[in-house]
Amino acid sequence: MSRVGRLGLVLLLVAWCEVWSAHAGGAGRRGSWELLLDSTGAVAMHMALTYCNTVVMFDQVSAGPSGLRMPGCGPDDDDKRSCWVHSVEYDIAANAVRPLALETDPWCSSGAFLSDGVFAQTGGYGDGVRRVRYFDPSVPLPRWSESSELLVDKRWYSSDHVLPEKDRVIVVGGLDVFTYEFIPKTAPEEGAFELPFLRQTRDKKESGDNLYPFVHLSSDGNLFIFANRDSILFDYNRNQVVKTFPTMPGGGPRNYPSTGSSVMLPLDFSDGFLKVEVMICGGAATGAYRAWRRGKFYRALSSCGRMVITDDEPNWAMEDMPGPRLLNPSSIARMYHSTAIVLPDGRILVGGSNPYKNYTFGVPYPTELRPPFATHSQSMNQRMLKLGCSGLVRKTNGAVHAVLNAPPSSTVAPAGFYLLSVVNGGIPSKFEWLRFAHE
């Protein structure tokens, strides 16, 4: 196979009726895979769903030629990095991609959506390690814009999270970086701030095990930050650790390169959106990275842990996953540098994979979902809310008019675009976009 390999884009079609039937004891049909595009042109190492019902995908620019040339470039321009497509925008309805010009390398970078739906993207590799990029899905210009403002520190494998303050994003960690900083800066002289927790959780022999730290915005406005096996509640305004949580059991690290996944479970109107529970699954056995270099491979961790971080005395509740589960496997291997996101119609979009040297291409349903940035088993800025309903009237034509209570603050729901779904009898509707703005 050529070094370009296959660039696939696949959808998992989830049968909502089957979920309902199975829940009721019936035997429904399984979901199925549909190959949408045999080649997107660029590996979907990173993906994000925009409010324009498009998906922006991008990869590293330093891996050489991709599967698609930029318009205006011919065979004589093969050695020019700018002539190869490393980012595309996928139009869900049209089932088509358009190339996006990308100047600097966003390999293993981080990102977050701002309140107006603009995607802010930070860090990367090489010439992109201190860059800040923006993509506005409402603008027809097919390119990313590069900010003149640089990050203070090099950010490779860092994590971003949007904050309650309007259009303020925190950037946490990175390879051999033990600081955090904000974009945009409040003053030209604003620098980066030390976070000793990141240094304490680094395992140098294992190439970190604290990269892409898990970051969640708690209901009190502080940040839950998890790295390796440890976690803190952090007041970013005062640069102060508010609480140190118990070390997570399970026999190994949970962060990159021993990558697991983390999710903040839905915030619920019934308790005023106060209870915050975090779940972390997977990871690698201690020493797995060094063992790999010797040609030995340890079994991945099979444990999951849940902790209510707002409890007075929080502790991890651990359980083991019963075993690997296959959901009607696809014909395209999805390995390192593949990603998956949910689409407004409920389908799961899967893209990317890097099995070669360079390019080779049923949970409880939320009522409100903030579209995250997905990469490396991470879902940055993921947020789910269960909204209260204060009125429900069935019309004569069969339609139902519902009055919902909006989230009470930007701490519960930072400003921006969200996906809204109505769940009736366990069956969710298609999502619709709505926007929360700061007063």
Image (spheres, rainbow, N blue to C red):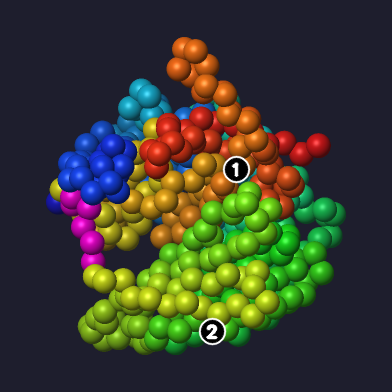
Nearest the viewer among 78 and 311 is 311
Q: Is residue 405 visible?
A: yes
**Vertical placement of residue 223 versus 90, above or below:** below
Q: Quadrant of the C terminus?
A: top right
* Residue at x-position 57% and y-position 48%: 385
Residue 6 higher or lower than 197, as above or below: above
Q: Residue furthest top?
A: 397
Q: In what element is the residue under mark 1?
A: loop
Q: Amino acid at mark 1?
A: Leu
Prevailing secondary structure class for the magenta stretch in the rendered image? loop
Tell me the magenta residue range: 324-329
Tell me which label, 2 or 1, sits earlier in the chain. 2
Which residue carries the number 1 mark? 387
> Badge 1, how many Cα within 10 Å: few under 14, some, many 20+?
many
Residue 38 lies within the magenta run: no
Answer whether residue 259 is visible to the viewer in this image: no
